Image: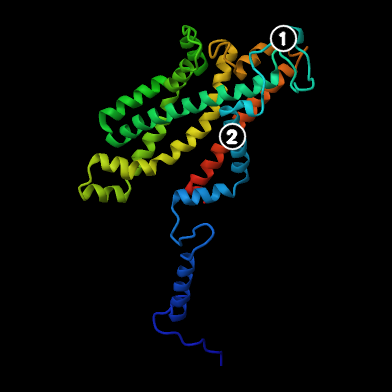
Amino acid sequence: MPEQPPYEPEGAVAGTGTGGAMDLAASEARSLEPTADDPRGKPRGLWSDAWRDLRRNPVFLASGLVILFLVVISLRPSLIASGNPLACDLAKAQQGSQPGHPFGYDGQGCDVYTRTVYGARTSVTVGVLATLGVAVLGSVLGGLAGFVGGVWDAVLSRVTDVFFAIPVVLGGLVLLSVVTSDTVWPVIGFMVLLGWPQVSRIARGSAITAKQNDYVQAARALGASSSRLLLRHIAPNAVAPVIVVSTIALGTYISLEATLSYLGVGLKPPTVSWGIDISAASPYIRDAPHMLLWPAGALAITVLAFIMLGDAVRDALDPKLR
């Protein structure tokens, strides 16, 4: 006779009988035990999971170290460059590397190393301030449009279509060519003016998706005000895509500033900028390539670092990739 299977209580299935229930309870208890990632033994949310993934991502660590270094030298460039970026000696114009001047001299006899270090301050400042302005303005307008809907949403959508139709470089040539200020504010204002529609559309879509969730509908049914729904329930759950796009866009704005400065409508001397130095070095690329190599290389590394950081943040915050 075939061997009979062991007796199980009625209604029991694999893993759900008495032994299965004990195993399940033990498993759940272990999942709530303190760990290195969660010492309090509490369930992790989106942001804690994202931070855990970022700490284990070598791309995030590498790009973060590069960006941290850029921020430090932007705040205190004298830590690694003791010279004056505006001190020039025409007798040394276009000379190559020398002791104490590893990057050589530019066409005006200025130290390329010192100007490259000080150029990070301008580029990082413009990129960070432009990104903050774009993120705040785009998030507010787009979030309100997605939450309120109706006429406000329709009007904002048409306005963003108009801004998307304006070529960025051409718009910069037209708008900044009439500006006489030597500060960074006109360039930052131009970037915010043409950059907010992209963030606005992303914030609008996130707000529309978030307000359809069950917890928002439940809060609305319990009598929560519109401001409470927007600030406490929708905004915290719609901000992740904005953070990702803003992080990637920061590198784009640094590149845009260099492009506009290269074309002569962005930052102007005596401001120290990588775009200005690249523009000044381009006619001498055959005779003195070092004048172009170092500022262009610093610009490329900076933009790449921010793009890699944005990609890492996107992968950590996207639940579809888990």
Q: 4 above or below 198?
A: below
Q: How is the image coloured?
A: rainbow
Q: Please name which of the two marks, 1 or 2, marks the residue nearer to the observer.
A: 1
Seen at 39% across and 23% down, the residue is 161
Say which amino acid is labelled 1: Asp
**The quarter of the displayed image where residue 308 is located:** top right
Q: Specify whether residue 165 is in view.
A: no
- The residue at which mark 1 appears reads as 89
The reply, left or right, for residue 32 in relation to residue 123 is: left
Q: 130 above or below 7?
A: above
The reply, left or right, for residue 101 in relation to residue 200 is: right
Farthest residue toward the bottom? 1
Residue 162 or residue 257, whichever sits in front: 257
**Disc marking residue 67:** 2
Residue 80 or residue 288, whichever sits in front: 80
Seen at 46% across and 48% down, the residue is 47
Q: Earlier in the sequence, mark 1 or mark 2?
A: 2
Q: Position of residue 301 (x, y in %)?
A: 64, 30
Q: Cα distance, mark 1 to mark 2?
A: 32 Å
Q: Position of residue 37 (x, y in %)?
A: 52, 57
Seen at 32% across and 35% down, the residue is 146
Q: Specify whether residue 305 is in view.
A: yes
Q: 283 above or below 157?
A: above
Tally of numbered discs? 2
Seen at 45% across and 68% down, the residue is 28
Callout 1 environment at 10 Å: few (<14), some (14 to 19), or many (20+)?
some
Dot 1 and dot 2 residues touching (CB under 8 Å): no
Residue 273 or residue 322, whichever sits in front: 273
Q: Position of residue 30 (x, y in %)?
A: 49, 68
Kind of element beneath mark 1:
loop
Kind of element beneath mark 2:
helix
Say which amino acid is labelled 2: Ile
